[in-house]
Amino acid sequence: MAGARRLELAEALALGPGWRHICHALLYAPDPGMLFGRIPLRYAVLMQMRFDGRLGFPGGFVEKLDSSLEDGLNRALLQQLGEGAAAFRVERADYRSSHAGSKPDVVAHFYAKCLTLEELLAVETGATRAKGHGLEVLGLVRVPLYTLRDGVGGLPIFLENSFIGAAREQLLGALEDLGLLEPGEVSGLKIPARQQGQPFVNPPNLR
């Protein structure tokens, strides 16, 4: 990942006062649905269309008044996703990784939270009434976790969208590590080369 280095959480938290912390979360839920009555949906995985036209995960900067990374993240989720985000809390146990960019001095933390399908549906429904809807956040999207018979439709073509910073790598790593796809399925995808020239960290959607 050009311009970024992976850190252990303790190392990231020990960075000096000149660094800012930003947190994002992948929200997902088991989904027993079938596309066209024959293609298992497996899981509902949420991403969002940002104000800049790129796909990313909900979240934002941790502020001085936040007592922890998770407090900042949950505050940002409530602002961006609305009342549906009040039904759950992202905890330290949901933490996955941290990466530091060289410019600006921002360290990005990534989390993944498993919800019930009912909780996830409430998030989708309430998101249109959230403070940032139609401004910093243009809408939520689900990630297709299947590949159609042509070998392109579904997840492969979804990955050709433009993603902010590390979001695409975070998505693929989570799909594999959390078992949301079958073992080896990610490595077998026809994944396009990572877009060049993107900034590493996600600029805040809501402060």
Image: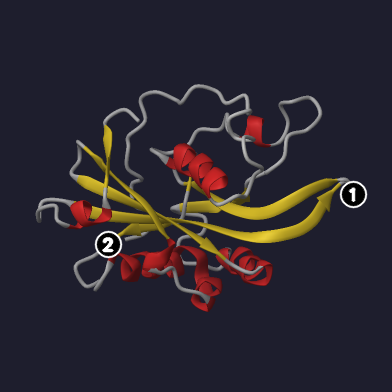
Which mark, residue 127? none
* Residue 190 at x, y percent in the picture: 62, 24
Q: Is residue 54 visible?
A: no
* Residue 14 at x, y percent in the picture: 14, 56
Regarding mark 1 in the picture, which secondary structure is present there?
A: loop
Q: How many residues crowd around disc 1 within 10 Å: few (fewer than 14), some, or many (20 or more)?
A: few
In which quadrant of the rendered view does residue 21 lie?
Answer: bottom left
Query: Furthest residue to the front?
Result: 183
* Residue 150 at x, y percent in the picture: 79, 25
58 w.r.t. 67: above or below: above
Query: Furthest residue to the right?
Result: 37
Left or right: 197 as drawn, with respect to 78: left
Task: Identify the residue at horizontal 55%, vertical 23% (top origin).
Answer: 192
Q: How many residues crowd around disc 2 within 10 Å: few (fewer than 14), some, or many (20 or more)?
A: many
Q: In the rendered structure, are the residues bearing label 2 and label 1 in contact, judged by CB atoms less than 8 Å apart?
A: no
| Location of the C terminus (image quadrant) | bottom left
Which mark, residue 62? 2
Q: Is residue 26 visible?
A: yes
* Residue 188 at x, y percent in the picture: 63, 28
Dot 1 amino acid type: Gly
Left or right: 40 as drawn, with respect to 55: right
Dot 2 amino acid type: Val
Task: Identify the residue at horizontal 37%, vertical 30% (top origin).
Answer: 198
Q: Tell me how far mark 2 sits from mark 1, CA to CA.
A: 43 Å
Task: Identify the residue at horizontal 26%, vertical 50% (top origin).
Answer: 8
Regarding mark 2 in the picture, which secondary structure is present there?
A: loop
The residue lying toward the viewer, choosing from 125 and 183, is 183
Q: Which residue is mark 1?
A: 37
Task: Identify the residue at horizontal 72%, vertical 40% (top origin).
Answer: 146
Mark nearest the camera among 2 and 1 is 1
| Location of the N terminus (image quadrant) | top left
Sequence-wise, the earlier of marks 2 and 1 is: 1
